[in-house]
Amino acid sequence: MSCRYGRAIAAAAAAMAAMSGCAAPAAPTGDPSTSPATIPASGVPFALFTHCGIYEARVQDTFFLAEQPLNDGHGNPPAGWGNPYQSGTITVAGSQAVFHDDKGHTVTFHERPGATSFLQTCS
């Protein structure tokens, strides 16, 4: 019987040692069935791929389509956009993502549920 108590004490000591480590406390998490934990909720730095125009965005493992695709008519980003990327921030709320940059550009994207890759790729 003392062997069982010895193991319990050892397990409790190991758990306390693990909990007293130097790591920062974990952030509270929401219900995973209602809010994807892998998608940022607001204003995260983001490099939007613009090389062949602005059609899609990938935020972590979620793919989004531009509400209104943007290009110059020749497979390039419109005038005033960086190429191959435009730096800014992206905010994800539910199935919508909104990109903003310091030049005043705004693009709204809508999630493609179940997508595992971009619809189009360019060279």
Image (cartoon, grey):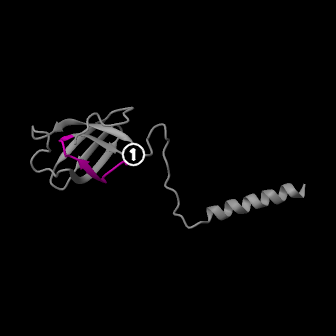
Is residue 81 located in the magenta-colored stretch of the structure? no
Tag 1's secondary structure? loop
Q: Magenta region: which residues?
A: 39-54
Residue 116, position as x, y percentages in the image: 38, 35
Which is nearer the eye, 10 or 26? 10
Residue in the image at 80% along x and 57% along y = 7
> In the shown orientation, is residue 38 left or right of residue 90?
right
User: What residue did someone put label 1 on?
Assistant: 39
Residue at the farthest bottom position:
22
Which amino acid, by three-letter code, is at mark 1?
Ile
Residue 33 versus residue 103 in the image, above or below: above
Which is nearer the eye, 76 or 69? 76
Mark 1 Cα-neighbour bin, 10 Å: few <14, some 14–19, many ≥20: some
Question: Looking at the rendering, which quadrant does residue 64 occupy?
Answer: top left
> In the shown orientation, is residue 65 left or right of residue 24?
left
Is residue 43 located in the magenta-colored stretch of the structure? yes
Residue 43, position as x, y percentages in the image: 30, 52
Residue in the image at 22% along x and 51% along y = 85
Residue in the image at 20% along x and 50% along y = 84
Q: Quadrant of the N terminus?
A: bottom right
Q: Quadrant of the C terminus?
A: top left
Residue 11, position as x, y percentages in the image: 74, 58
Which is nearer the eye, 81 or 15? 81
